[in-house]
Amino acid sequence: GNVGIGTTTPGNLLAVDGNVTMDGLYAMGTTTTSSLIATSTLEVRGVSGSDLIVGDGRIGLATSTPWGTLAIEQIADAGDNNELFPAFWIGDSGTTSPAFTVINATGNVGVGTSSPQSLLSVSGGTTNPLILANQTSTGDILNLLDNGTSAFVVKDGGNVGIGTAGPGAKL
């Protein structure tokens, strides 16, 4: 039969009404059932604090107070001179060359680098173009601004302007 802790009407093999603290949990579902259900907040903690929080439609990684739908806080590696881990990383496991990473409180973003040095750092090493832009409408292909003023523009049709927003020729 079903066992209830804090409830007289357990609806599952084990039903607990209240908070539960466990040291080591292995939950396995089937192809048709969930492996772990929390009806309020689910919190998974590591040695140093909250590693995963799920509740109120929010997910927090390395934070106990997610401030958005998905909140990821950066943590330091205590075993490596408190070096900061990237806050967000997409890449193959076992590699130090991520496809995409966001690091440190400045919000630097790296594509193809694990240590972006500016707001956007792009690194590539293949025979393909480093940046490929395919303009499929009639707007500017590229417009780099300096304090709100066009410094370098590539217009639809290929005209390039340096210091002008409306080049009348190819260069």
Image (cartoon, rainbow, N blue to C red):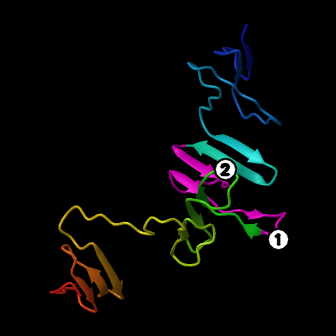
Q: Earlier in the sequence, mark 1 or mark 2?
A: 1
Residue 32 image position (x, y, % from top left) = 56, 18
Q: Which residues are magenta?
A: 56-82
Badge 1 marks a residue whose secondary structure is loop
Q: Amino acid at mark 1?
A: Asn
Identify residue for label 2: 93
Residue 117 image position (x, y, % from top left) = 59, 78
Residue 151 image position (x, y, % from top left) = 32, 88
Callout 2: 10 Å neighbours few (<14), some, many (20+)? few
Callout 1: 10 Å neighbours few (<14), some, many (20+)? few
Identify residue for label 1: 81
Instruction: Judge depth for marks 1 and 2 and give the one in front.
Output: 2
Q: Amino acid at mark 2?
A: Ser
Residue 166 against residue 116 in the figure, above or below: below
Residue pictured at 62% horizontal, 20% vertical: 30
Q: Nearer the viewer, residue 93 or 8?
A: 93
Residue 5 image position (x, y, % from top left) = 75, 22
Badge 2 marks a residue whose secondary structure is loop
Residue pictured at 51% horizontal, 76% vertical: 119
